[in-house]
Amino acid sequence: MIGHITYLSEEQMHAKFGRRLQDRDSFSYDFKTDFQVESYLKYQGDTFVKRFDANSYLYISKAMDYYDLAAVARS
């Protein structure tokens, strides 16, 4: 969910969601989903988790750590 907010600019997020509430007329003041943006991010996060294995990011990160462009350019 945190990663997904980097895909849209602040202006796009505001235009798409603003501070509109999700299926309610007032704040619940608890940990339920009050805002439309929360519902959207939860859906996107759940969808992402179902499609990707978190371990793949460990391997990609490690590969990036080992990759040395300067060494490739010298060869």
Image (spheres, grey):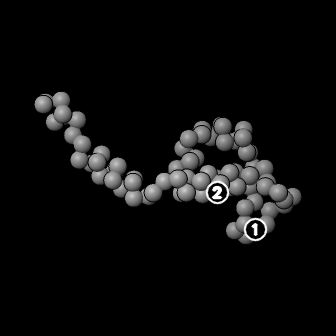
- Furthest toward the bottom, the residue is 30
Helix, strand or loop under label 1: loop
State the mark number for residue 43.
none
Q: Is 68 in front, or is 46?
A: 46
Can residue 12 be seen in this snapshot? yes
Residue 66, x across and y down, in percent: 23, 47
What residue sits 52% from the left and 50% below the top? Answer: 3
73 sits to left or right of 53: left
Label whose residue precedes the other's in the sequence (1 or 2) = 1
Q: Quadrant of the C terminus?
A: top left
Instruction: Evaluate whether residue 2 shows in this view.
Output: no
Label 1 sits on what residue type? Answer: Tyr
The residue under label 1 is 29
Please tell me which residue is depicted at 44% across the width and 58% down the height of the picture. Answer: 54
Depth check, mark 1 against mark 2: the one in front is: 2
Residue linked to disc 2: 42
Q: Is residue 47 left or right of residue 63?
A: right
- Between the residue at mark 1 and the residue at mark 2, the CA separation in whole angstroms equals 18 Å
In x, y percent, where is residue 15?
A: 72, 38
What residue is drawn where x is 65% and y is 54%?
A: 43
Q: Is residue 4 above or below residue 70?
A: below
The picture places residue 30, in percent across and down from the top left corner, at 73, 70
Residue 62 place in picture, x, y as percent: 29, 52
Pick out the residue farthest to the left.
75
Q: Amino acid at mark 2?
A: Lys
Instruction: Give the quadrant of residue 39.
Output: bottom right
